[in-house]
Image: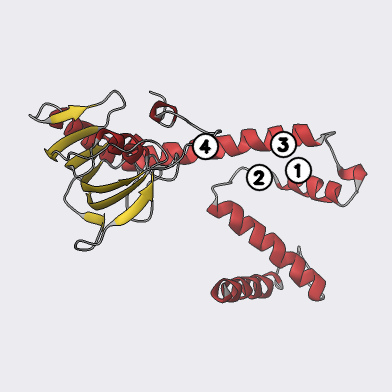
Amino acid sequence: MKLGIKVFGIACLSATLFSCGNKDVALNNLQDSVSFCLGFQTAAMWHQQGVDTVTNDAFFAGFKAFNKDEENYPLDLDQEQYSELMQRYVALIEEKEKNKLAEQYGPNREEGEKFLNENKEKTGVVATASGLQYEILSEGKGPKPSLYDTIEVLYKGTLLDGTVFDSTTGNETVKFPLIPYSLIEGWIEAFPLLSEGTKAKLFIPYNLAYGEYGNAAIQPYSTLIFEVELKKVIKGKKPENGPQRIEDVLPAK
């Protein structure tokens, strides 16, 4: 947090010094300088979020309207209309970002689809309607978990090129509750198919993993492979509200 404040302070100082030579803006006191910094920070935040279609005149009209300068407010918007406009604009920004990622990481998607199409033809590999694939390496004899149970597992997660992005350490198990939206959909669907004591491989398409955006260790549109061992099933209690079936959690086809 301190680093962020320091960086912002340097940015504002640089902006203020730069603007002092700008004939369009006179920074005569602390209030002027802080105002300039706030504008600079807002523009920087928009740039980071992909907002690049702001009209300066309309923006300043809205800013003045917030300060009750009604003469400079060109639109008569209530809160509901304002929310609708912003939702539409956010949707456009998100769609633009998705298209950018799809173009940049499209090869990941193509590679994953090719792999899964070939993999599902292999002996022992089972493909579900969602696109999940799994292979039983050794069958356990215990109970199968249900939604909202807790699983105790050993696992190793790899990319298609064999890169390990996550794993348990040695024989040290970890516990995960099978709570909707707390785990990737591929795990939520796969583990109820496995009996306690089972060792298996899971082949998870991107839309049941980290999707179109990925995360810090996994690129967008990445198909993932997990080697898992279901060591123990701990029974849980289904809540009265919330999804009751695995099908309710999976993304629509």
Question: SS of the residue at dot 2?
Answer: loop
| Of marks 1 and 3, the one in the foreground | 3
The nearer-to-camera label among 3 and 2 is: 3
Foreground mark, 4 or 3, reads 4
The picture places residue 218, in percent across and down from the top left corner, at 32, 50
Q: Is residue 122 above or below residue 25?
A: above
Out of 34 and 4, give the one closest to the viewer: 4
Q: Which mark is residue 239?
A: 4
Q: The disc labelled 3 sits on which kind of residue?
A: Ser
Tell whether label 2 touches label 1 (CB within 8 Å): yes
* Circle number at residue 58: 1
Q: Which residue is mark 3?
A: 83
Towards the viewer: 150 or 164:
150
Res 103 visible: yes
From the viewer's side, name the closer residue of 215 and 21: 215
> Distance of mark 2 from mark 4, alpha carbons?
45 Å
Tag 2 residue: 54
Contact (CB < 8 A) between labels 4 and 1? no
Q: Which is nearer the N-term, disc 3 or disc 2?
A: 2
Q: Earlier in the sequence, mark 2 or mark 4?
A: 2
In the image, 90: left or right of 95?
Answer: right
Q: CA distance from mark 3 to mark 2?
A: 17 Å
Q: Residues within 10 Å of mark 2 (few under 14, many from 20)?
A: few
User: Whole-Å distance between the Cαs marked 4 and 3?
Assistant: 33 Å
- Measuring from the top left, give residue 132's x and y in whole percent: 27, 32
Q: Of the residues shown, which amino acid type is indicated by label 4?
A: Pro
Amino acid type of the residue tagged 1 in the rendering:
Ala
Vertical order, 31 against 73 (above or below): below
- Is residue 229 placed above or below 172 in the rendered structure? above
The image shows residue 23 at horizontal and vertical percentages of 75, 66
